[in-house]
Amino acid sequence: METTVDGLVIGSLYALVALGPCLVYGLLRVLDIANAASLTLGGYLVLVLAERAGSPLLGVLAGLAAGAALGWVIQRWIYLPILDRGPIVTLVTGIGLYIVATELFRLVFGPSQRSAHVDLPLPDAELGGVRLEGIDLLVLAVTFGVIGATWYVLTRTRSGVLWQAVAQDRKVAGAVGVNSPRVIAAVFAIGYLLSALAGALLSVKYDAVYPTLGDIPAYKMLAIIILGGLGSPLGTIVAALLIGLVESWVVASFGFALPRDAIAFVALIAMLLIRPQGLIPSRVVKA
C-alpha cells in the first residue's frame, strides 16, 4: 500500500509537468522541452521567498505567475516565429532554451543543491495502516483537482471547443473567427504555470532545489506524452500515473537493479513495439 501511494504521488507530479506540453503538442505539434525550466523556476521561488519573506505560499504564487509569464514570452517571441520551420527546429530550440535557463539558474543561485527548509503545517493521515504525509496528500489533492478542472474545461466549456478547433487547424480556426494566438498563448501560460506548481511541490516534498532539477522531468515528460498518445490529455495523465506506479513497484521489488529513471523509457520502447499510437490516442485529427 505504501509503495502504491508513493507511486501515485510521483505519478501526480509527472502528470502536472507533462499535461501542459501535451496540450501544446495538440495545438502546434511542438514538443516543448523548455517547459521544464518553469519547474526549476517554481522550486527556486519557493526557496527564495521562504528564506527572505518567510512565506512559502507567496513563493508558490510568485512561481505560478512567473511560470505563466515565461510561457507567454516563449510562445510569443521564440516558438511562433519558427513554427513553419518544422518540428526538428522547434525541438532543438526548446532544448537550447532549457540549457540556457539551467545555466542562468546556476549563475544566479549557485551550482550546489540547496534546501528549501519549508515546513508546511499540513496534517498527516492514515489509510489502511499506511501513514500519509501532509505534503503527499497536498500533491494528490492538487493534481486530481487540476485533472478535474482540465477535463471540465476541455469537454464542457467554450475554451475547450476553441482548443479543439485550433488543434484541428489553427489557420481555418482563425478564418472563422477564432483568436488562435490568444488560445495558443493561454495554453502555453497554463502549461508553464502547472510545471512551476510541480516544481514548488517537488522542492517542498524533497526539501531540495538545484539548477538541473528539471532534467529528469524533461525527458520523462517526452516519454509520458508519447506513451499516452501524442496530444491526448487523458492518455498523458494515465501514462504519468502508470509510470509513477511502475517505478515504485519495480524499485520496491528489485531495488535499484534497474535504475528508476530508466523505467519510463523501457515502458516507452515496449509501447512503441506493441501499440505505437499510445495508450489513448488523441481524437483530434489535424487537417
Image (spheres, rainbow, N blue to C red):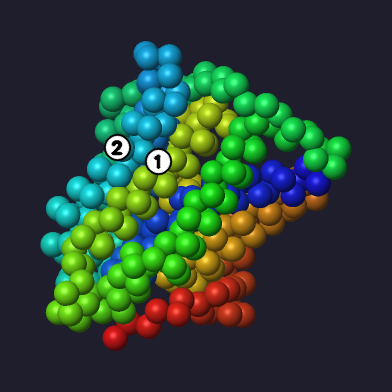
Q: Amino acid at mark 2?
A: Ala
Residue 47 or 115: which is nearer the viewer? Answer: 47
Would residue 174 be visible to someone looking at this image?
A: no
Q: Amino acid at mark 1?
A: Ala
**Viewed as shown, does residue 111 lie left or right of 79?**
right
Name the quarter where the C terminus is drawn: bottom left
Q: For the point 39% across and 25% down, which residue is it?
A: 58
Q: For the point 50% across and 77% down, which residue is it?
A: 281
Q: Position of residue 45 (x, y in %)?
A: 37, 28
Residue, disc 1: 196
Residue 160 or 68: which is nearer the viewer? Answer: 160
Determine the image quadrant of residue 264.
bottom right
Mark 1 neighbour density, 10 Å: few (under 14) some (14–19) many (20 or more): many
The numbered mark at residue 78 is none
Separation of residues labelled 1 and 2 (CA atoms): 8 Å
Outermost residue toward the front in this view: 157
Residue, disc 2: 66
Q: Is residue 109 above or below residue 232?
A: above
Determine the image quadrant of residue 163.
bottom left
Please report contact status of discs 1 and 2: CB closer than 8 Å, yes or no: yes
Q: Secondary structure at mark 2?
A: helix
Q: Secondary structure at mark 1?
A: helix
Mark 2 neighbour density, 10 Å: few (under 14) some (14–19) many (20 or more): many
Q: Is residue 124 above or below residue 257?
A: above
Q: Position of residue 158 (x, y in %)?
A: 34, 67
